[in-house]
Image (tube, rainbow, N blue to C red):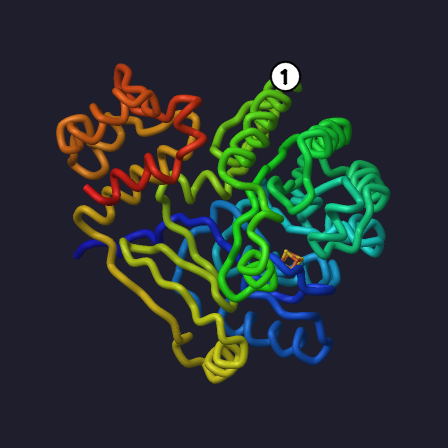
Amino acid sequence: MNAPAAPPSAGIYIHLPFCPYICPYCDFAKWAWDDAGAERYLAALRAELADAPPVRARTLFFGGGTPSLYTPDVIASLIAGVRARFALPDDAEVTVEANPDPSLAARIPGLRAAGVNRLSVGVQSFDPRELHVLGRRHTAHDVANAVRAARDAGFDNLSVDLIFGAPGQTEASWRASLDAAVALGVEHISCYGLTIEEGTPYATWFARDPSAFADEGREAALYALALAKLRAAGFEQYEISNWARPGYRSRHNALYWANAPYLGLGVGAATYLDGVRSTHTRDLDAYIEAALARRPIPGESERLGGAVQLGEAIMLALRTAEGVDLGAFRERYGVDVSERYRSVVDDLVEGGVLEAGAGYVRLTERGRFVANDVCGAFLAD
Ligand code: SF4
């Protein structure tokens, strides 16, 4: 008789969708906080956790929304639930996304005591006018307080998110935000270009006045500034939008780029297990009702195979500094990338956006500016 297969090891993602206010550019699954809704959601999440498929947890990531709005006790109980259900190792990376509003600093010691060992703080900008345009209600002072509180509480792994391309942003103000982020002494910085998402107030604004937003050339100039500044400050760019001090790459996000399994819990959350990618509904009531009734969560799922699976795996790997490890890829997928995608690789190398070396293909620095197009070429093939 065969021994039962060991459950796959996976990153665990928990979506906590409530926010203190709603930012006009945001397209995440999120709702303004209300006590009753947040309580009901928690009950649904606990039910889903109890019914989730068996995996061995490698990392745990609370994303949102604004997870830091839940009390540290709630976060502690969810971590305990994940430890009990998925054998999360004691030394696993446990990240909470936090909004640096004035109430955050007081919650930080509780988050540390709860077992959180990495905070990812949604700073976005240090410029008061940009923060206002982005609809954010914190100040640079709040951010400094939060970082100080985190250090005092023993956090040694802090990340901040920044946005470039906000209306009204100049190269000087972006440079100042990068400098301020570096000056905080954090271990990790993410820089995301602003994207206009359909259905958001920003999409309406963009339709009315596209000139208010950075065009491609301007975005490229701002991105180039991030590359230069963060490199000079000793950060390693290990992914298109992510920079880290040595030893501080996000272990959880690394699983996504390695096309490794992950299990997502909560409204709108995505899971990738046994070659099937599924995404929960973004309808909050539908999610809560199904989870509380212990019914399957509505949503979509597809088995990834063939060209789609290969294209996605290449696309994800190309986002990283190391690119595609050809030997590892052959072993895992049975495909020689330089053979199967010979003409795509040749064209991109010729165009100066891809570099093919002994055992790898990866983006050149120029390729990072047009990463979506480069990656898309493998999906289309
Ligand atoms: S950007 Fe963050 S804080 Fe703002 S609405 Fe979206 S999830 Fe909430």
> What is the x, y in percent for residue 25?
60, 57
> What is the x, y in percent for residue 283?
49, 75
> What is the x, y in percent for residue 102?
84, 53
Res 43 visible? yes
Answer with left or right where residue 20 lies relative to residue 204.
right
Ligand 1, seen in the image, is in the quarter at bottom right
What residue does disc 1 label? Answer: 232
Residue depicted at x 55% and y 55%: 83
Residue nearest the observer in this picture, 221 or 144: 221
Residue depicted at x 29% and y 58%: 276
Q: Residue 358 occupies which quadrant of the picture?
A: top left
Q: Amino acid at mark 1?
A: Ala
Q: Secondary structure at mark 1?
A: helix
Q: Quadrant of the C terminus?
A: top left
The local crowd at label 1, few if under 14, some if 14 to 19, many if 20 or more residues have their Cα within 10 Å, is few
Q: Residue 146 occupies which quadrant of the picture?
A: top right
Q: Quadrant of the N terminus?
A: bottom left
Residue depicted at x 73% and y 76%: 35
Residue depicted at x 22% and y 44%: 380
